[in-house]
Amino acid sequence: MKYAEMTAIELKNVSRDETLVVLPIAAVEQHGPHLPTATDEIICTAVAEQVEQRLKESVLLLPTLWLGASQHHLRWGATLTSRVENYETLLCEICESLLDDGFRRVLILNGHGGNIGPMQISLRRLQVHYRNCQLMAASYWSIAEAEITALMEGECKTVGHACEAETSLVMHLRPELVRKSHIENSDDYQLDMVDGVYLCNDMFQRTSQGATGRPDLATAEKGAEMFSKIVYRVTDVLKSLQKIPFSE
Amino acid sequence: MKYAEMTAIELKNVSRDETLVVLPIAAVEQHGPHLPTATDEIICTAVAEQVEQRLKESVLLLPTLWLGASQHHLRWGATLTSRVENYETLLCEICESLLDDGFRRVLILNGHGGNIGPMQISLRRLQVHYRNCQLMAASYWSIAEAEITALMEGECKTVGHACEAETSLVMHLRPELVRKSHIENSDDYQLDMVDGVYLCNDMFQRTSQGATGRPDLATAEKGAEMFSKIVYRVTDVLKSLQKIPFSE
Amino acid sequence: MKYAEMTAIELKNVSRDETLVVLPIAAVEQHGPHLPTATDEIICTAVAEQVEQRLKESVLLLPTLWLGASQHHLRWGATLTSRVENYETLLCEICESLLDDGFRRVLILNGHGGNIGPMQISLRRLQVHYRNCQLMAASYWSIAEAEITALMEGECKTVGHACEAETSLVMHLRPELVRKSHIENSDDYQLDMVDGVYLCNDMFQRTSQGATGRPDLATAEKGAEMFSKIVYRVTDVLKSLQKIPFSE
Amino acid sequence: MKYAEMTAIELKNVSRDETLVVLPIAAVEQHGPHLPTATDEIICTAVAEQVEQRLKESVLLLPTLWLGASQHHLRWGATLTSRVENYETLLCEICESLLDDGFRRVLILNGHGGNIGPMQISLRRLQVHYRNCQLMAASYWSIAEAEITALMEGECKTVGHACEAETSLVMHLRPELVRKSHIENSDDYQLDMVDGVYLCNDMFQRTSQGATGRPDLATAEKGAEMFSKIVYRVTDVLKSLQKIPFSE
Amino acid sequence: MKYAEMTAIELKNVSRDETLVVLPIAAVEQHGPHLPTATDEIICTAVAEQVEQRLKESVLLLPTLWLGASQHHLRWGATLTSRVENYETLLCEICESLLDDGFRRVLILNGHGGNIGPMQISLRRLQVHYRNCQLMAASYWSIAEAEITALMEGECKTVGHACEAETSLVMHLRPELVRKSHIENSDDYQLDMVDGVYLCNDMFQRTSQGATGRPDLATAEKGAEMFSKIVYRVTDVLKSLQKIPFSE
Amino acid sequence: MKYAEMTAIELKNVSRDETLVVLPIAAVEQHGPHLPTATDEIICTAVAEQVEQRLKESVLLLPTLWLGASQHHLRWGATLTSRVENYETLLCEICESLLDDGFRRVLILNGHGGNIGPMQISLRRLQVHYRNCQLMAASYWSIAEAEITALMEGECKTVGHACEAETSLVMHLRPELVRKSHIENSDDYQLDMVDGVYLCNDMFQRTSQGATGRPDLATAEKGAEMFSKIVYRVTDVLKSLQKIPFSE
């Protein structure tokens, strides 16, 4: 079910206890020299829509919130963002609209690394007031971690920024938006976790071009396979989320 | 130009002084028994994209912010919203991302009545800090007021909510999303301005079904003509906005 | 009835359902080279007090909040202001004091253009919590629009800033405060609505001296007639507001 | 000088370094069974205006902010208030308007006990940003403590609430507003400082009728003498404040 | 009882109505050339712990919040602080944790002058929501004023900053932390209350070395006697606070 | 170096570029039936102090902020907390005090799981304003992950809540505070990450007694060894943090 395409009457008839409401969140921010700013939005929306296709009866999909918490990209320009603390509030408010309307299973499905912290915090802020609801959050790559890792050829086996995985996925989903001639090996980036310590640097400090990993290893074929496996795995996990019993 | 489809390098090359950046804002909220919740988003995005097609060189179009200030619809259910004061902050932040990146002409192009107040306030909050930029806001119907009025057959000649105009426009743009059998004359609604006094009631108090005006007079043909005239007029006006000189 | 002059016991005996509580709001800000900073406060208070004289039994008049949302005048100096978002909060709080004390009909009566946005937003913020109360707001000129227009001789037929209307009214109400020798034709100002687009400039950008319209056409006689007609009309409309039925 | 009666040009010519800007703040809140809600506003404004008369050249008087921090009176009804934390912000904003306009000596002159905390906090919030200005605050009774004490006949020698002092002062300033038949001995109130400990109770808990002290000992004559001595003393002290050297 | 050393089960068994919960608050900020930054924390904790030793059955002692509202010391460096308005919120939150857990007698026991305003404001913010609880605040020196005054030899008879009293107390409690060779007569400081007027200057403006009064008159013996008398007096007063009846 | 024990002059002489300032943060919250509420504070402070002993020249240790973000424990009682969004602000403010005083290497050293999100967010909020400083955060267990895992005998190999690790550590550090008779196998708790999805439940929902893992396997000997290895590893890593070059 797609929230945006339904009427108020139709939405009133949706089961509050059983339906899993999914809010995709992403970012519109610089993605290196070769990917469009909407990269995260493109991938996250595509995953969410494919999953909804497979779980039409039980998933209620919201439109993707393209805005993300992207202040750490600002110095590269080409970045739209909310302050991280206000982004928490924004997510709280969208969820409150749903929870106050009676929905009890809400999943934030994320496509931008910078959103992980604020999306988890926003659920903690909500949980105090909606204890008998199941508030959930995940990035597509944390759900499909094994599937993605298996397909990565570069040294880094997880989704970074404008990296092998993201580049492959956009090559598959929107090939015309990839500037292939600008793709470069970007594995000169710096991690933000070293020896268990979080080093809070922005992407201007951590990367030389605004990208990480090995976009040069990206292919549309890899993107197609990765996408299909992500969709399969996310569908599977979302199905299981609908069976979690509520606790008070 | 479409912001979301461009890379950081391409965006860096866009003229900051001449380009008109357009941020479409809408709502996902109940639209009576016959229209989808995304009505405002559908219309506003369609207008914005058509205008961008006609002004490719000079307009930089952002993706539509589908979230609106819709608390006054909450009691009808099927409504996603931000608190009105936080919505101001949200608009400020998106604009700040642009203004801090050097863009000097920003237009918020609105498709939801409840956004007018907060969008104007958000520009006032910004103006204090960005005095040498041209901050602008308009609803598509305030720009194309004459064109719309000329086509309305019901007593009310302006765009209301799930009304003759909006219904016609969705019939034209997304006919499959209109539940024709649920369309009813809704001119039993109450105005929020009486004798120059603003009466602050919510839509549950002001309407009997969540709609206003005469959706029963809507036709796809009227919608097509209205849409084409709106696009023509908005294109025209946006062209003129690019020539306004900056003042300090 | 004047709130400020009554005791707690007397106020306890006032009917919560029938009484119309009126909160006048204004501004103390630069008013061009010829008018005192308190211009809006002088006019708005005079109107409110005359109306209360005529509706002693049914109107409960609060003292005038002289502070306004006047940041757009700051660059002319001689301006006291609250930030626009905090001004909303301030109005909410005064109204909450009344609503929590049981009063159910509250009207903000405004005398400063810059307050219109925040006063309407403040009512929207309140309405969510006080749905069974009638929250209202109006500027004296929006109520008496026809009467004022009929008396204006300059091209602009509505109340601007330190304009023909305001200058005439202060000439009538506080003639000793008008610096006649400094009055000049000010119709070189720029509108903030052009082709349906809101252009957010401050008064330093929009006017050459901090005033608009034709103060040079102002006379005390015009002011006297205008004032009397405004009072008559506002009295009339306020009487009708007391009969609006409450809705849940 | 009265800020409200001056034009922008006249205010521009006022010395920023020498002039003492005075912002009177008060309250409109229940004042027991015998005094009007505006009691604090009446007294504080009268003092401020008399002082300005005596220091016309050197004092720039703002209109009185009648709103106070009065939440602790709310349960008696008949009380308008701002939340205490927002009241701090409100005072900051009015002062910022002055400080950003170049004025360097600002005194908040207070007439309501509940304002003391927030007015001092507001200056501390401002001081961080305006270190080379002299930010000052005083209640009229803290300046004229000795004079007031000397005239009090009841056991309590300081200004309380609707007490011997306030009742006498209103008897002098606005005799028609005192309901003499409702005056009662109110010395059954509880202090909020006991053994050096602040006991945070509201006025509904601390008083039996919303008043403190011995209003039954009040006379207009006492009020006249007290008022005259307060004005004399405040004038004297304000004169000295203009000579305090600025420090960086 | 010490909150920090108890388990949840043990804390559940503590009487909510009778127990006095004590939250010590202090500061870590510059204390002149001779005292450690933790001076206020050292003294306040020592007092609180000694009192708890004497009232084990009836007092529930929290750990000391070492952070204070110390912005006015920032220009001396060596100062950790919260903004004054956020410090209010912080105190509210700790108290709310206790009040929502059922405790009804809460005392903030303060050891830093700059905390007095915000701690009282924080209780006012709380009192609106917890009217049937006894919310209290005191500085150790306001409780033991007479005892301290009797022992001071310098002209100033009250506790200042890094002064005769504080220096003596640290000489007694943590002698190894006093840099004796840096102690100097500091009675060249400026008061912040002159003629009943609060002059809001920071400590960089008010002192020549970040200290006040006569630290040169401090001795460990004086500190020992003072400490013992403070403990005795605070113990006495806290005992009496447990007998105050609750009011609604 | 210990910040709290130093004077302003001594702190002024500390190298801003080389010194690593360490702010330990913890919690005072329910820790099951057998551990004191201060468990996190006890462990984190002990680690921090031991590390400081080993790196006296290069580490500047602040006192431990015992307050944590512990709302998810509130329903167990015996919990002091700040709201998660305000906790971010609190951490920002303490760090700002340091950064504005010139220090350029700040590490938040954490001892409470619920603080991880807000501490990382707080650094992101700060990073925008302090880009040329190195802002860092770590929990002691993320630094010493391998060492801790190697010593855990239960199925769960990481630090949970009142678990095998925490119980062992308190048995070593403060044996008198462990209620041994109340220790129970607690491995019936629910994880908050399942299949890559964050399930936001509070500890009342996730545990049967407020504890996780296998506290019944805890021993003082294990605690001693674990503590010693943690201290060794944290010392090692902190040494390396001082060599990270600054980037702009």
Image: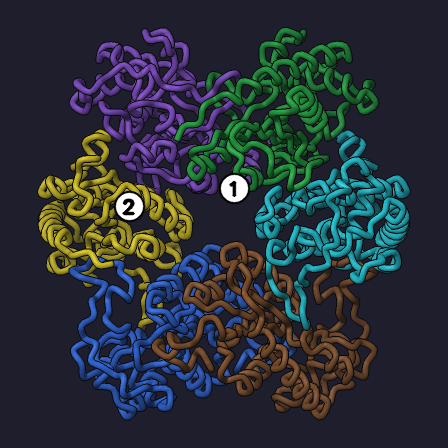
Chain colours: A yellow, B purple, C green, D cyan, E brown, F blue
Give coordinates of residue B206: x percent, y percent.
Answer: 38, 24
**How far, Cα to Cα, is label 2 from label 1?**
27 Å
Foreground residue among E127 and A201? E127
Q: Residue at x 44, y 75 (%)?
A: E15
User: Is there any visible trace of residue F86 in the rendered image?
Assistant: yes
Q: How many marks?
A: 2
- Nearest-to-viewer mark from 2 and 1: 1
- Residue that badge 1 annotates: C100
Q: Are marks 2 and 1 in contact (CB under 8 Å)?
A: no
Q: Is residue C54 left or right of residue A78?
A: right
Give the crowd class for mark 1: few <14, some 14-19, many >=20 residues within 10 Å.
few
Q: Position of residue B47 (x, y in %)?
A: 31, 22
Q: Is residue A165 left or right of residue C50?
A: left
Q: Residues within 10 Å of mark 2 (few under 14, many from 20)?
A: some
Q: Is residue F141 found left or right of E6 in the rendered image? A: left
E197 vs C74, nearest the viewer: E197
Residue type at tag 1 = Asp
- The residue tagged with tag 2: helix, strand or loop? helix
- Read off the chain for label 2: A
Task: Please tell me which residue is depicted at 66% across the width and 88% down the height of the picture.
Answer: E228
Residue B238 placed where, x, y %? 42, 21
Asked if residue E218 lies left or right of residue F215, the reply is: right
Residue designated by label 2: A99
The residue drawn where x is 35% and y is 62% is F117
Task: Please give the chain letter of the residue carrying mark 1.
Answer: C
Q: Amino acid at mark 2?
A: Leu
Q: Is residue B141 above or below residue B110?
A: above
Expressed as whole percent of the image width and height from the top left, the position of residue A182 reads 26, 45
Query: In which quarter of the view is residue E240 placed?
Result: bottom right
Element type where label 1 sits in the image? helix
Depth order, front residue of F97/E81: E81
